[in-house]
Image: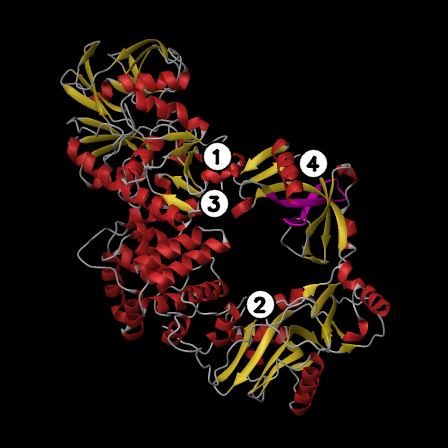
Amino acid sequence: MIAFAELLDRLTLTPGRLAKIALLRRFFETEADPDRGWALAALTGELSFTAAKAGLIRQVAEARVDPLLLGLSYDFVGDLAETVALIWPARTEAAPPSVTEIVATLRSRPKGELPGVLSSWLDGSGPNVRYALLKLITGSLRVGASARLAKTALAEFAAAHGQVVAPDDVEEVWHGLSPPYAALWDWLEGRTGAPDAAGAPVFRPPMLAHPLEAGDLAALEASAFAAEWKWDGIRVQLVRAPGGERIFSRGAEDVSGAFPDLAGVLPADAVLDGELLVVRDGVVAPFADLQQRLNRKSAAAKIVAAFPLRVRLYDILFDGAEDLRALPFVARRARLEAWLARHPSGRMDLSALIAFGSVEELVAIRAGTRAASIEGLMLKRLDSPYVPGRPRGLWWKWKRDPLTIDAVVMYAQRGHGKRSSFYSDYTFGLWREDGELVPVGKAYSGFTDEELVRLDRWIRNHTTRAYGPVREVERGLVLEVAFDAAQYSGRHKSGVALRFPRVARLRWDKPFEEADRLETLVRMIEG
Amino acid sequence: MPHPDTWLCVRPEGLYCRPGEFYIDPLVAVERAIITHAHADHARSGHQAVLATAETLAIMDVRMGEGRSGVSQQVLVPGEVVEMGGVRVWVQPAGHVLGSAQVAMEFAGSRAVVSGDYKRAADPTCAPFVPIACDVFVTEATFALPIFVHPPAIGEARKLIASVALFPERSHVVGCYALGKAQRLIALLREAGWDAPIYLHGALMPLCAAYERLGVRLGALRAATGEARERLAGAIVLAPPSAIADRWARRLADPVTCLASGWMTVRQRARAKGVELPLVISDHADWPELLQTLDDVGAPEVWVTHGAEEALLHAIALSGRKGRALRLLGYGDDGLEEAA
């Protein structure tokens, strides 16, 4: 548990992706079985304990610590687990529990014994281990390392053992494994072949599209491509196998629990790729509606009824046990259509193919997408196999042209990691009718490194007030901000929020009084 | 026998000994000041007469310019009594930074000790705290919450060296206060076996040189400013806390941002400052040291100057002693908070 606690501390504070991977890899190399497997399960969110709650932590702490001192300390720290980890009176007679012991104990002991067990664990541990322990048992690790990052580290770990394993290879078997992952370590360390998912509903890494740039358009061969609308929902993978059914997000997260209305959506074994949307009377609702259904572990009946879901299918990866991914797009499309014809459903439909004869025609179709409240077009090579990752030239996403406004920089904040010495995040505003400048959004991309140096200098030289890490600046710098859409929102004082804002141009030349007015932006809101 | 509160009082200028006609660590220029240590919030410039240890006077000269601490300087030698207006005054080491001292005062049969800032943990760069039995003990309370239990500092130095081994292509930049913390960290690194040159921000150099002149060996030190980026890969670089995530740090090789401070005990503090490797190294007594010190000096009455008074006063009351908050303002600011 000591090594695991150190790993958590380091991951929490390390901003760099490569550094996090290095920390994880070293942990996998140095930690023994089965502890490293249970730790991996905890890191990837595969462990959850229900018996240990914040109330239990408070209860055991109050039995050991003066309540006034506990309260004052909690006020200072602001996090109960951390307060208790720090304040717990040291005793050294016992050794800290291993991750394996923690898992086994929490699964087997009755709830009534937990306070005693937890107290003795805390007695045997130092402050960092106590913190990791409390976070682990309450299921709130949040170390800023995604499950994908752990899989990338596993692939690098395998490379150190002379194995050629890609993160996607780990992904493909992941959901068929269970902690402490003996079969996984055997494979990664070269003792056996890849684990057999054997009928388990596993995630298949999705195929992603490149944004279409001007040069790509010029080279585009219209007759080699199919076109679809670009749907503004979230990408999901529907999986049914003899071992069960799952709905996965694009990032391999099992999100089945959030969408009970999609339980049993697949009447036969298959792996389908599609877009999750809120659809009412055949009309796709704005993304804001779908947001009401996201980031929930479960869903109340009222929410389910108010925001009806539909999966718009665009690809088929498996039909039964048959892997179709090597087939060209046209063939998979025919199989998808045939599959849906065999298994008609009110909860799924097809993403239509758009007829076109030439690139010029496509350009015209795309030009109409904004008026039709559609995000853009997807172009897929007719002969493209289903390749995980983002292979070049096979699938293109071609978003509608962004909208732009000229906005005034109001606040700036420092970035993270390599940008931590630069003011690189800018809150910008527009003029309201009463002459007040009101914030409408925040952008932190779209400029070059050279431009960032100049922006940083400007912010420092024009700061009027500092609030912790945030600087308020003089009015004087105008940004041309590009964004995909505007919507009503309570997040900003202006009542409007932007989707995908980024800096399109620095308007050093433009007087700030001539920046856009809020009403201009309000007129851009769809629907 | 008059109680110390009849002859030791809080004035707007600071803590004042009435019969001795001197202040201890006054916030403004005064006629006569005894200075416990040379940190900027305790040692102000422009007094008429300044009394302090030889090391503190030497460090004040470095920081303020020779003779700027006051019109006249008088060296206080630990253990040697000076009489002022019927008050017997002497100093003893406080273990905080080089030259730091507690001020003991005896008047008409009662004794008060003003600790200044202090710590009890071992520090190779300064003399250890000497407990003085007294009737009233005046203590700081910077880390007076039971969450503060500083780990052995040598372990934190080893943690830093282990991180350099893990990321050999990156610079490790450690934010540390220029007086005391920087030199202690260097000495700890030497103790932990780090023999390579240690690179310094310009602001740390004069005080490191002063420590060396005063007999504290720090090993090979180099200026980080002007050094090629490649040379700083795999190096340990010390800088003031304000510089570690600012423009100055851009010269370093993909730096791992570290901060040496007692506040680094609390993760949220580290996170909020963008610190990648927090090092819990403090110049101040932690909670167990504060309580231990109260036992060691045996004072039936304790006055608390600055910090988390409420928790300490509660603990003082629980132990059957009398406690009092002095509410002295002006200490612990001046950028020291992040450096403590």
Q: Name the residue under label 1.
A: B243
Q: Does the magenta stretch include residue A435?
A: yes
Question: Disc 2 vs disc 1: Cβ atoms closer than 8 Å?
Answer: no
Which residue is pictured at 82% across the width and 77% down the height? A355
Mark 1 secondary-structure assignment = helix
Q: How far apart are marks 1 and 3 (CA)?
A: 12 Å
Q: What stretch is highlighted in magenta?
A: A424-448
Q: Name the residue under label 2.
A: A294
Image label count = 4
Name the quarter where the N terminus of chain A is drawn: bottom left
* Displayed quadrant of residue A295: bottom right
Q: Residue B15 carries which label?
A: none
**Label 2: how many residues lie within 10 Å, few (<14), some (14-19) or many (20+)?**
some
* Between marks 1 and 4 in the image, the one whose residue lies nearer the viewer: 1
Q: Is residue B8 magenta?
A: no
**Label 4: how many residues lie within 10 Å, few (<14), some (14-19) or many (20+)?**
some
For the residues tagged 2 and 4, is the chain the same? yes
**Mark 1 or 3, nearer chain start:** 1
Mark 1 is on which residue type?
A: Ala
For the residues tagged 1 and 4, is the chain the same? no
Percent x, y of residue A43: 42, 64
Residue closest to the eye, A249 or B213: B213
For the residues tagged 4 and 3, is the chain the same? no
Q: Name the residue under label 3.
A: B274
Q: Residue A475 carries which label?
A: 4
Which residue is pictured at 29% across the width and 36% down the height? B190
Q: How far apart are marks 3 and 2 (CA)?
A: 30 Å
Mark 4 secondary-structure assignment = loop
Mark 4 is on which residue type?
A: Arg
Q: Distance between the residues labelled 4 and 3?
A: 28 Å
